[in-house]
Amino acid sequence: MDMMAIVSSLLAAQAGSTRMQVAASIMKSNVDAEKSAVMTLLGAGQNSPANLGPGIGGNLDVSA
């Protein structure tokens, strides 16, 4: 193998590694966005009384 073939194969391997890192980063970003969308749809982390019946959660006596 001549020197140029070795150098070009090393550069191709390095470029492939960089592409894999970029692809992994994009996939993680997409997964995080999908997780956020699902959590929003499920209403996780929200303590809203908007969908409770009338008279529920209005007055709470916590002195006892």
Image: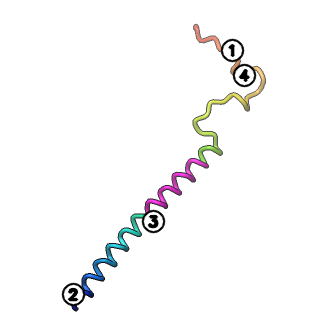
Cα distance, mark 2 to mark 4? 78 Å
Q: Position of residue 2 (x, y in %)?
A: 22, 91
Task: Identify residue type, mark 2.
Answer: Met
Task: Answer with mark 3 or mark 1, whichever residue precedes in sequence.
Answer: 3
Residue marked by disc 1: 59
In the image, residue 28 lies in the stretch drawn in magenta? yes
In the rendered structure, which amino acid carries the disc numbered 3? Answer: Ala
Disc 3 and disc 4 in contact, CB within 8 angstroms: no
Helix, strand or loop at mark 3 = helix
Amino acid type indicated by mark 1: Asn
Return the residue at label 3: 23
| Residue stretch rendered in magenta on the structure | 24-37
| Between 6 and 64, the one nearer to me in the picture | 6
Left or right of residue 42: residue 12: left
Disc 1 versus disc 2: nearer the observer: 2
Residue ID for mark 2: 3
Residue under label 4, please give it: 56
